[in-house]
Amino acid sequence: MVGESTSRHHWELYGYWRDTNPYLSKRDDICLYSDVISSNTSTVESLSKCLTLNANGDKVHDFSDVNIMDIANHCGMTTYWISTHHKYGIVDSSVPKGMSSANHFHYLMDDFPNEAELYDEKLLAYLEKALADPGDQKLIVLQLMGTHIEYKARYPEKFTKFTHKDTLARLYPYADTDQRRTLINDYDNANVYQDYILNQVLNILSCHKEEGNDVSAVYFSDHGEEVYDYRNFLGHTPQSNMSWLHEIPFFTWGINHTCNQDQPYQMNHFSHTLLDWMDIQCNSFQPEKSLWFSNLDYGQRYMGNGEKYEPTLGFKKQITHPSLSAFNRRK
Ligand SMILES: [Zn+2]
């Protein structure tokens, strides 16, 4: 599962103050990784790094290197790329081109041209069909629209959970208009809906597993997002120098490897984790770059613009109501 524009800083599972994970938080079968960051801060930059063997190259926006679909196809697996993204966007088109070698290649907009009806729940039927197809060696990738900008368009009305703006006015100094506070609510609601979708995917996989199939899953977001969290900024930009925009949620399900949950990792090496996961050997495979390498040691990580990455630590929302200054404890 490839997410979109989802910041770990807006997930309850990572300590966010709102309950944006009402479904996943009830599961005891996911393995949450605390310190995974994206290689870059826009979709094509990030996915071209983590889905190809171009891990250390300086090429961005480039799917010319061997990618994970090519490798899985070559090794006899049946491959699926199922997406709710735009197929022919000006910026995004290199992702569908890169992944078009998948045996089953679905952009749901071809089937649902009315974009207003194309919520991520449409992916579920395609997943069930893929699982029901003959064969037991499959790589199925679901690319979610997730929490991409135009947040309110990402979830059906019934998933509107957060509407209250009073607290936001105190917590987010840069969300200084009603419109901006509404955007924070919309983003958090989109996260709740995504939480529902991810839980539904895991429920489907659980049923498939109970039928005797060997099945496992990984979820990550392509990069993070900002919604006036700590500065006057909304969205994400390519090759950003902001740590926040690299800090993504990442979890696994049904995978025997459960080590390194709190070890630093960066997604430009994720193709090696995929090779490890699928048990594929090749000259290009570098086991020390797999997330599950027993002595995983990263050293310094670098952001999309080449600067050193330093974690966003100690960021806590402080409620500082002006009238609190009148309260003092007697000596
Ligand atoms: Zn993206």
Image: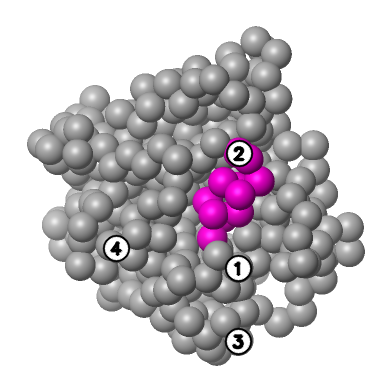
**Residue 75 is one of the magenta-drawn residues:** yes
Viewer-side residue, 313 vs 244: 244
Q: Give the range drawn in magenta.
A: 67-77
Of labels 1 and 2, earlier in sequence is 1
Q: Is residue 12 above or below residue 51?
A: above
What residue sits right under mark 3 in the picture?
A: 308
Spatial separation of the CA atoms under disc 1 and disc 2: 18 Å
Q: The residue under label 1 is which amino acid type?
A: Leu
Lower position in the chain sequence, tag 3 or tag 1 = 1
Residue placed at 25% from the left, 52% from the top?
87
Mark 1 / mark 4, whichever is N-terminal: 1
Which of labels 1 and 4 is toward the front? 1
* Residue bearing the label numbered 1: 53
Residue drawn at the location 59% of the way across and 24% of the way down: 135
User: Residue 312 location in percent, x, y?
Assistant: 57, 71
Near mark 1 (Cα within 10 A), the count class, few <14, some 14-19 or many ≥20, is many
- Disc 3 to disc 2, C-alpha distance: 38 Å
Q: Which mark is residue 92?
A: 4
Q: Is mark 4 on a helix, strand or loop?
A: loop
* Residue type, mark 2 in image: Met
